Structures are given as C-alpha cells and as structure tokens.
Image (cartoon, rainbow, N blue to C red):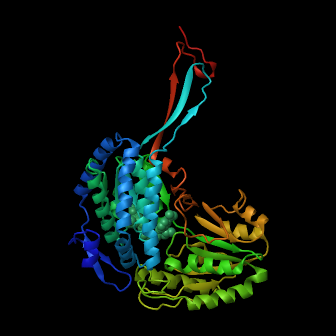
Amino acid sequence: MRGLYAALGMVPENGDLESVSPIDGEILGSVQTPKAADVDKIIADARHAFEAWRAVPAPRRGELVRLLGEELRAAKEPLARLVTLEAGKIVSEGLGEVQEMIDICDFAVGLSRQLYGLTIASERPEHRMIEQWHSLGPVAIVSAFNFPVAVWAWNAALALVCGNSILWKPSEKTPLTAAAVMTLLDRAVARFGDAPAGLAQLLHGGREIGEALARDPRIALVSATGSTRMGRTIGPLVAARFGRSLLELGGNNAMIVAPSADLKLAERAILFSAAGTAGQRCTTLRRLIVHQSIADGFVARLAALYALLPVGDPRDDGVLVGPLIDEAAADTMADALDAARSQGGIVHGGERLGPRFVRPALVEMAAHDGVVLQETFAPILYVLRYDTLAEAIALNNAVPQGLSSAIFTTDLREAEAFIADTGSDCGIANVNIGPSGAEIGGAFGGEKETGGGRESGTDSWRAYMRRSTNTINYGSALPLAQGVRFEI
Ligand code: NAD
C-alpha cells in the first residue's frame, strides 16, 4: 500500500474509519470522519466558496476541470489499482472506471462554453424574452461503493463548470479511493491558482453524514446514488425543506432475447452485463426474458458458460468475476437463491467459493414475482420465458424499478417497438447490446423507484443550475401581457 499511496501523492491517515479490501479482508488504511461541528463548518465554507466561484467565468471554471482531467490521466493506473483493491473490480474495469472520469472531464470542459439559454418571442412590441442558466449553490454528492469514483466525477465535473461548490460523502465502504481523488483534485486546484477555499470538500462517514447534508438548507442540490432504501430517506428530507434532489437508485434490469436474435452476440452481452462486476452494477442484467421457441437450447448453453466463468482474485489475469463487497452481500445472495428455490426456481451455479466469492447464478423461474421483483445486489440472473413481444415488454416493465433494459433482435419492427413510447419504461433501452456499460455522452438514470434523476451527458447539466426567465422592454410604452389594462 505504501507504494500506492506514494504514486497517488496520498498521506496515510490514522482515522476512525477503516477501509477493508473485499479481496482478502486486509485493512488497506483508514480515514477520519468529521464531528457534527466540523460538518457545520464544512457546509459554511462550501457556501462561501460558492459565492466566489459563481463569479468566475464558466470557461475559466472549465480550466479547473481540464486540469483535473490531466491529473486523472497521469494517475490512471494507480487510481485504478486502488479501485480494484477497495471495491474488488477486475483490472480492466478499474481502468475503465477512471477512464469514465476522464471522459466526463473532457465533456464538462466543452460544456463550460455551452451553458446555453434561449431567446423567446415576446407577444409585446419592443420586448424580448430570454432564459438564462445560473449557478445553483453547494452540491452534495452521496455516492455508492460500486462506482466509488466515477459517480463523483459525473456530478463533480458538471457541478463545478456550472458554478457550484461541491461536498462529497463517499460510501463508507470505499473511503480511500475518495481520498485519492481529492488528493488529485487538490493538485489541480493548486495548479489552477485562485480557486476559493472550500470549493471541493470530502466528508467521510455513514448515513448520518448523508442525512445531515440532506437536511441542511444551505445545500442547494443533493445528488444521491445508492439503494432505493437510501433514496426513500434522503428524498423526503430534501423535499421537506424544498431543496432539490437528484436520485440515482436501484435497478432490476431485463433483456429480451427474441427468436431472430444473434445468439452469439446475446451470450457475450449476457455474460458481461449479468456476471461482470460480480453483479454489482446498478445496470446489471437481473432478468432474462427468452422466447419459448429458443429457450431450452439457449438456457442450457448459458448454464454451461456460467460454469466456465473465471471467479477469483480480480488482480489476476484472466479473472472476470471478483469478490462481492462484503460477507453480508454473499449472505444476501444465498438468501435470495433460497427464496427463488422456494418459489420453484431451478438454480444453476451460485455456490459460495469463499467468504466473499461466489459463482454467478442462473435461475430458471416459472413465475415473475416474489424475489424476481427485488434488486439483489449480487450476480443472480432470473430466466423467464415469453410467447409474444407484448408479453415480453409487459414483463420488462413489471417491476418497481426503471433503470435499464435491452432487446436482442434482428427484426426492425421488434427493435423499434421496444424503444417506442409504448415499449420499455426504463431510462435506458438498448438494442443488441446489454443493459450495462453506458457511455458518458448520454443522460444516465431511470424511472419509478430508480428515482427519476439524470446525470452525465446531453442536458443533464441543467439539474446543477437554476433557470432565470427575463423579459426586457426596450420601448417607451408599458403594454401588459394578455391585453390586461391597468392605468389610472
Ligand atoms: P447504499 O444505499 O447502501 O449507500 C449509498 C450511499 O448512501 C452511501 O454513501 C451510504 O453511506 C449512503 N446512505 C445509505 N443510507 C442512507 C440514508 N438513510 N441517509 C443518507 N445516506 C445514506 O448503496 P450501496 O450498497 O453503496 O450501493 C448499491 C446500490 O446503489 C444499489 O442499489 C445500486 O443499484 C445503486 N446504484 C445506483 C446507481 C444509479 O446510477 N442508479 C449507480 C450505482 C449504484
């Protein structure tokens, strides 16, 4: 660890929150959590920093994010290694996570010159209407363990170019990667020169810190990524003070495999999206809806491939499935498989291979209910069968979550029907690729219990700004809208 700390410019702390590697249970280091009075000061500092930062021209704010991107490029390999150690991701996924941070920095730098408003036709002579976007205030980012650094970057890069200060409450399971990223951001801030103190701060800790941020009226936006259970607490706390929240919560993502599908392509997509990241992505494939006519052969082939999946130390070459984040997650998976069996499910795989290591499970289910409707954050893929496309789309939509979805078909009519208004009800609907592995150019997020938030690309930046509508009269009369007369 000493070499990794040095490569990332980190100073080891002796704090009260330990980081435990899911690979072997080794304690990687520790960080300090703040006291209640410290939290109050951190928020006050964020408010002051916001007041100074919003006066900096947006393209200049973009320069800070450009420098952050440079720091991330330079530290990509050691930061990815730390992601692997702390979150258990295989090497290529750790590198991919840091690449995603770099990509969103590039996007945000361009965006810093494109925070466009509108000009609107006025009904009144010699009047003009415009719509502008202004900075919002301090933005709190609450993030989950499974994307310990990328989710922060999606939010931070946009929030910063939009003129906001940021506060980060990372998952208590992945504090060291957060500390490493803050070290890199501090370097970018030092090179930038005149950023206000308190512009970007880190608050380690558990749900109590997240709740303190959600309650505080000085925080303009709480962007929270994690379980639907977390969203049920944070959402109402922010709403009670009329604050804004951006919720990125759980998914229960499905893929339809139609009779015309390219099955070789579908197999690869299923393995990556259902077993990759050990089933711990919000977009992980959890339900496979296969046409009756191809189901027997296809499921038998998948079960054989599942048995070949290399499970083990994510640092080793060739391993595709690393550990679950902790033993509780492996227990939860075992409980879900028991529940599936008691519902008549036929389980292939799913064995526990160590305290936190499991073989991904494929479970043939007769009915779409009970445990199938829940997000179990582990590599379990439930398989269901269908007869008509309408039935398959209805199954795709018949869960409380609405994050991601996919169809494999070479029939244009089926593909279009799936992504049409009457098709998938999810925020993401893909054709001939799996539901996971999004690019940063698109808006990311989902409907229903997934929370409705959108992050990352297209116009997601608007969530980090406030809209101002302005009517300007450049004439010498004062006509009222809708022809109203009000004169003495
Ligand atoms: P989690 O809900 O346990 O924790 C997420 C974050 O919220 C952590 O920082 C945690 O400390 C905090 N938190 C938890 N309960 C809280 C509360 N009551 N009040 C305030 N803060 C609270 O989630 P996790 O186990 O870290 O991550 C897995 C979950 O995250 C899955 O449900 C997954 O689908 C979801 N997720 C969603 C997205 C998305 O973009 N939709 C992305 C990644 C993960």
Closer to us: 430 or 389:
430
Residue 325, by quadrant, is bottom left
Q: Residue furthest top?
A: 488
Q: Is residue 21 visible?
A: yes
Q: Is residue 291 above or below residue 32?
A: below
Closer to us: 128 or 57:
57
Residue under the point 49% across and 44% down? 114
* Left or right for 66, reference 402: left
Tell me where residue 124 appears, x and y as whole percent.
60, 21
Count all numbered tags in the image, as a single digit: 0
Tell me where residue 465 appears, x and y as whole percent.
45, 45
Residue 118, by quadrant, is top right
Q: Is residue 319 above or below residue 102?
A: below
Q: Is residue 211 above or below residue 10?
A: above
Tell me where residue 277 appears, x and y as whole percent.
49, 77
Query: In the image, ligand 1 is in what quadrant?
Result: bottom left
Residue under the point 42% across and 81% down? 328
Q: Is residue 17 visible?
A: no
Closer to us: 187 or 460:
187
Closer to us: 363 or 102:
102
Residue under the point 57% across and 75% down? 273
The N terminus - image quarter: bottom left
Q: Residue furthest left?
A: 14
